[in-house]
Amino acid sequence: MKKNQKVAVDQLEVGTFIRLPMSWKDHPFLFSSFKIKNTAQIELIKALGLKDVFFDPEKSDVEPVTSATAEQMPPTEEEINTLKEQMLSDKAAKIEEQKKLKRDLKKTEQQFERSVAMMRSMVAKVSSRPLNAVNEAKISSTT
């Protein structure tokens, strides 16, 4: 079996691992590749206007369903909209969390650079003015 097979959206089933053929910015899911957790996600994929997605049999719990075995009741429009809003909210929260981590990392890098500069300055002063360097080291270590 090929790793990624093209499969019709109508054949998707809960437990199927898929990859959406679109950018992550163009859908409400957190990632473009994921395992389908409920029928509302299937309806949401259909609402995106996709006819086909890529199916990964190695990561799936089940094979895509054929029309003869389809038994599930489709979720209501309200359930789909609720799921879509929740997913968009979760996605926005994850993006904001990543931005915060990036800002925190930038602050840490800046603090590290200041500390390295301070250490270089103190090492340079040790040979020319050892007593002053020791006093400055004591003062800077308390701040």
Image (spheres, rainbow, N blue to C red):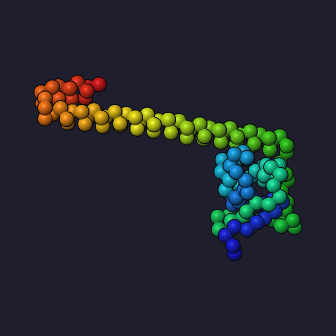
Seen from this angle, which residue lies furthest front? Answer: 128
Quarter of the figure with residue 13: bottom right
Q: Residue at x 30, y 37 (%)?
A: 116
Q: Is residue 41 left or right of residue 121?
A: right
Can the viewer see residue 122 in this picture? yes
In the image, residue 7 lies at what x, y percent? 78, 65
Q: Residue at x 69, y 45 (%)?
A: 25
In the image, residue 36 lies at what x, y percent? 71, 55
Near-viewer residue (15 or 8): 8
Q: Is residue 123 left or right of residue 100?
A: left
Q: How many marks?
A: 0
User: Is 34 above or below relative to 138?
Assistant: below
User: Is 13 above or below relative to 103?
Assistant: below
Quadrant occupied by the N terminus:
bottom right
Q: Residue at x 73, y 68 (%)?
A: 5
Can the viewer see residue 62 in this picture? no
Q: Is residue 108 left or right of residue 44?
A: left
Quadrant occupied by the C terminus:
top left
Seen from this angle, which residue lies furthest bottom? Answer: 1
Near-viewer residue (47 or 76): 47
Quarter of the figure with residue 115: top left
Q: Residue at x 55, y 40 (%)?
A: 98
In the image, residue 129 lies at what x, y percent? 13, 29
User: Is 50 above or below relative to 136?
Assistant: below
